[in-house]
Image (cartoon, helix red, strand yellow):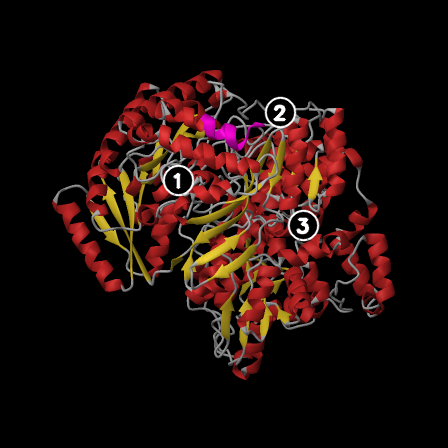
Amino acid sequence: MELEPSLAESLSKLQKRIQGELRWDPVTKSLYAAGACLYRVLPRAVLWPKGPEDVILALELAVREGIPVTARGGGTSRTGNELGEGLIIDFSKHMNRILEMQPEARLVKVQPGVVLADLNEYIKPQGLFFPPDPSTKDHCTIGGMIANNSSGPMSVKYGTTRRYVERLELILSNGETVRTGPVSPEEALQMPGKREREIYRTMAHIMDRYREAMEQERPHATKDSSGYHLWGVKKSQGVLDLTPMLVGSEGTLGIVTQATLRLMPLVSCRLSGMVYFRELSSVGEATQRILEFEPSMVEIMEKQILDLARKNYPGLGQHIPEGTEAVLVVELEGEEEAPLREAFSKMALQLLENKLACEFKVASGPKEMALFSRIRSISGPILNKVKGSRKPRAFIEDPAVHPSRLPQYIDGLRGLFEKHGVEASIYGHAGDGNLHSMVFLDLSSPQDVQRMAALSADVYELVLKLKGTISGEHGDGRLRTQFLPLQYPRLHLAFREIKQVFDPEGILNPGVIVAQPQDLLQKNLRFQSLKTMGTGGSLEHPQVLEQIQGCSGCGKCRSYCPVARASRQEWASARGKINLVREILSGNLPEGIISSHEFRLVMELCINCKRCLKECPSGVDVPWVALCGRKELLARDGEDPAQRLLTDTRLLCTLGSATAPLSNLALSSPPARKLLEKTLGLDSTRKLPGFSKSTAKTQALKRLNRGKDRVALFLSCHANFNDPEGEGLAAFEVLRRNGLKVILPEVGCCAMARINAGADAKLMGQLRKNLKALAPLAGIGIPILFTEPSCLLALKMEYPRILASQEARAVAESCMDIHEFLLDLRQKGLLNLDLAPIPKKVGHHTPCHLRALGDGQAPGRLLSLIPGLEVVQFGDFCCGMGGTFGLKAKNAKLSLEMGSPLQEQIRNSGADLVATSCGACKMQIHQATGLETVHPLKLLLEAYSRNAASSLGKNSVLPKDSLQGAFQGRRFRRIWKLHSHLSRLNPGKT
């Protein structure tokens, strides 16, 4: 959509006046055309303000040009109120500061872009927290919570956001600033702004004229986020407080730039339990009994979700018996655990004696508490893993009825699902009657779109018959605005008057809460058919199309993606990459946009950390989509020679090693580093690892290498050329001291850096050469061990996908992390434990690629076997290096910002040194913290070496068939019958 010339000129002028940023290029607009909702609405421009002054200037332009303005935070709304066809104001990047803390008064003043989880982390040391807890708490913003009156599982005890907003500062559409709070009639007359005075005058009249309607039409529900909340606006003696009404107004009356929030003290103890049902019909009455115990949480999950959880998370199976129709997860809070357990005992007795439940479990300790929490937290996201064209869609996901009417509501829902011939799953907040129903539909089908509209109308009719509300916590947005007159036959007229006095220009989120169109629910749906461009390019791969269709747009990637967290940019998020490719394949963007700077920027802002594979609720493989985007760029525009050289790790290492120590002198020379920055783009401030003249492989081949059982060791470039003693030889020696004969296969670089660059089309020969060296080993069941997680990930994940061969899959099955291998020996009682004490405190960092392959805790567990060594496991943070990403000058600052949470944790840990198995992580951590950073195997070897007995100890030769005992797992079971022949085979050089 081309901008009108006058608007383009106005935007250019505004760009020069603001402190923040303003963009209106096609890629940026496309990234903000969608969010977590069902809709696509293309904006004209996006603003990232740095202060209220920027917002005022933007509103002036909007009024002058007659374009809408929509405030946006994390883009997590399911109702579509974060989208608009005019100017989007994104507060999450700059206006995200906590301004003032008043612990004694239990108040905090914040800007709208503050993320809820960050706020609670900040105030936790004061023993306080902000109670509303939506499932998006890791990535939603306070501004969005205020707009929607958000809540979550704990609302049954603590209520919604409205209860905790003390005051607001907002800007009206005419640029006036309003500060809310109790205002007397006399004070209202003295307000500085003309429109503000008119607002108070009009609101006083509305509160009087619609008093009867307010009494008759108020929902009989414990929570309500539908329409403008008029209850609580008028106090005694004519005092008005606009705050309760502005909370939940979805950015339609003013733009919030500051909020003062009430806080609550943290509780000392929580305890959770699970209640099991054979029939869903019993849940309603059971919930009523549970509420008598004043729980802090009562969450429901029904059969389909439970079956999916059992299938996708085997570790949870023991807590979800077959045949369970529904589960309630219940939580109690208090100062001590004993009274909570006593309350649970009484609760269980009531439910079981009255045959309302078939089983009742109470968490035995923190481990089971975490399991119960895990089961609850996956309830909604796991539905996105269902395959097929019909996906779980959120459009009747938020009605709320009084908990006493929950049985009728559940029965009514089931009947409507059957009437309309749809599958649906129910989960959510049973404690306050707020159920989230996810209906499986294909919204690219006109028939299913009509089915959605008909089902919505029937569900809301049912809800209103039960005196409930059509929205409990998500707001109305585009989903429900057209149904508001049904819930508020007279009050919806008051809403129009309120909108008119606050926003007579009609520019603030038009079409939400107050709107004319009756088919808003069905307009601007984003589920267009994806097309191919006819070029046979990487982005047209069926797997890419599948990933795009699988993304729900929930925005959780904003919390776990290291690049998105550090940059606070939508185009850095995983969702942003999916949306951009969807826009191209839907025909909304021209194919030529692929060659644009903006497309390249979006695709390059993925470091292939693989966190999406673990943390994306829908399981979308966004790194694969980004790699395909890079492949498409290379195919169209060719590869930059500097990039080509920088990603050829083996060539650089071979040259560096051959020319050492001269190469090391050059790397430490400022003029030489400046030259590298100019030619290769390497950051001149980076402290690059030196090269060894003698490689690990060369040195290992000279050492005694005996053992009855064989393992293969894949030496990474870093282990072989940069850190031969601390990683390569350490691995060799640790294996040798456990009685193993170590094979060093003739392999080249794993090529992970080249794969990350999207250059795998040029790598087939190199990948096949590595497979040729490893396949014979895999064929006879020899474990192939890796010290470097990225190399292991390349062989296990990337090779099979790129080559799509049985040989690649077979080799992948035989590859494993060396630390896991050693722990397997320990489990079988076969690990040499002649370890001398090391009286130090070491912090262990788990690299992203190791975590992507499992839980990533094996190195830390291995280190904990060393006597006297105190091991501190750091949190799940990325170091920020991202392979060659952090080496480049253009990414250096962002790279360090990405690693700052880890760096802070390291500095506060009191560790003497840090251990991590990734060479890039070692480089980043050492440079950022100054602490010695080593491979875990270096410490293990040190413990062996300190104990002279270990070198020729009784465990130096393992019992016959010891490896067969150690590896009865799936990877090697099919091969071990050939074990007796191993001594006659000699693949590779040793």
Can residue 553 be seen by looking at this rendering? no
Q: Identify which amino acid the numbered label 2 is placed on.
A: Ser
Q: Which residue is mark 2?
A: 586
What separation in Å lies between label 1 and label 3 (alpha carbons)?
60 Å
Mark 2 or 1, nearer chain start: 1
Above or below: residue 518 compared with residue 606:
above
Number of residues whose C-alpha sits closer than 10 Å to that of mark 1, classed few (under 14), some (14–19) or many (20 or more) = many
Q: Which residues are magenta?
A: 496-506
Tag 3 secondary structure = helix
* Direction from residue 264 to residue 738 in the image, left or right: right
Image quarter where the C terminus lies is: bottom right
| Residue 105 picture location, percent across and down | 42, 61
Mark number for residue 233? 1
| Residue 358 picture location, percent across and down | 19, 43
Mark number for residue 752? 3
| Residue 860 picture location, percent across and down | 51, 66
| Residue 817 picture location, percent across and down | 55, 58
Disc 3 + disc 2, Cβ < 8 Å: no
